[in-house]
Image (tube, helix red, strand yellow):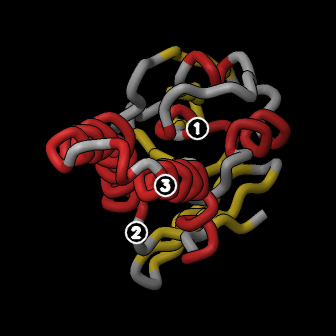
Amino acid sequence: MELSLTLFKHLKMLIILIFTSVVFLGLALYFYDDFSNKTLVYLLILFFVLFMLPVLYLHYNYYENSKGVTYEIEKSGLIIKKNNIKREIKIDSINEIVFFMTANRLQKSGYSQFAFENYHYAKIILKDDEQIIITCLFSDKIEAILESNFKAIKITKIKTFYPVI
């Protein structure tokens, strides 16, 4: 299975933020006459700080750690392509896979309070202590993909409030 970053995958991860923003702005415009301008500005700042800023920072953080890389995940190992250089990692050189995810993502809960709760990443630790990061920008099912292909590898899941790399 080949995983690469595409515009569609970026938008798919941002869909909750986009939906929340549209609903919030729609409600703000609907109730515009009921609020003073000062109250509306405070609500917009609060929305930006609580919802938009954390997601945008996570998205940027994940993109910066993943741009220009393509992964091919197979049962025999992992192939990393970056800058026209292909590197093959055999399954026997992988020591552990660690997933960093929020509690809602860990419990597979459909309800989330913040838009960043769907962001998560996997850290593949090799036997020589090198680490490879695969983020959810490649696939929101990265957990299932890695677990199904690397069944013999130790997998650890770490709960984190804000899964920044």
Q: Residues within 10 Å of mark 3 (few under 14, many from 20)?
A: few
Between circles 3 and 1, the one closer to the viewer is 3
Q: CA distance from mark 3 to mark 2?
A: 40 Å
Q: Residue at x 66, y 55 (%)?
A: 139
The image quarter containing residue 161 is top left
Q: How many marks?
A: 3
| Callout 1 secondary element | helix
Q: Amino acid at mark 2?
A: Lys
Q: Earlier in the sequence, mark 3 or mark 2?
A: 3
| Callout 2 secondary element | loop
| Above or below for 118 versus 61 | above
**Which residue carries the number 3 mark?**
30
Instruction: Look at the image and tell me in which quarter the C terminus lies.
Output: top left
Q: Amino acid at mark 3?
A: Tyr
In this rendering, would 1 be left or right of 42? right
Q: Position of residue 145 (x, y in %)?
A: 77, 45
Q: Earlier in the sequence, mark 3 or mark 1?
A: 3
Residue 123 visible to an observer of this rendering: no
Query: 63 or 55, which lies in front?
Result: 55
**Which residue carries the number 1 mark?**
118
Q: Residue furthest left?
A: 38
Q: Residue at x 36, y 52 (%)?
A: 33
Between circles 1 and 2, the one closer to the viewer is 1
Query: 48 or 73, which lies in front?
Result: 48
Q: CA distance from mark 1 to mark 2?
A: 20 Å
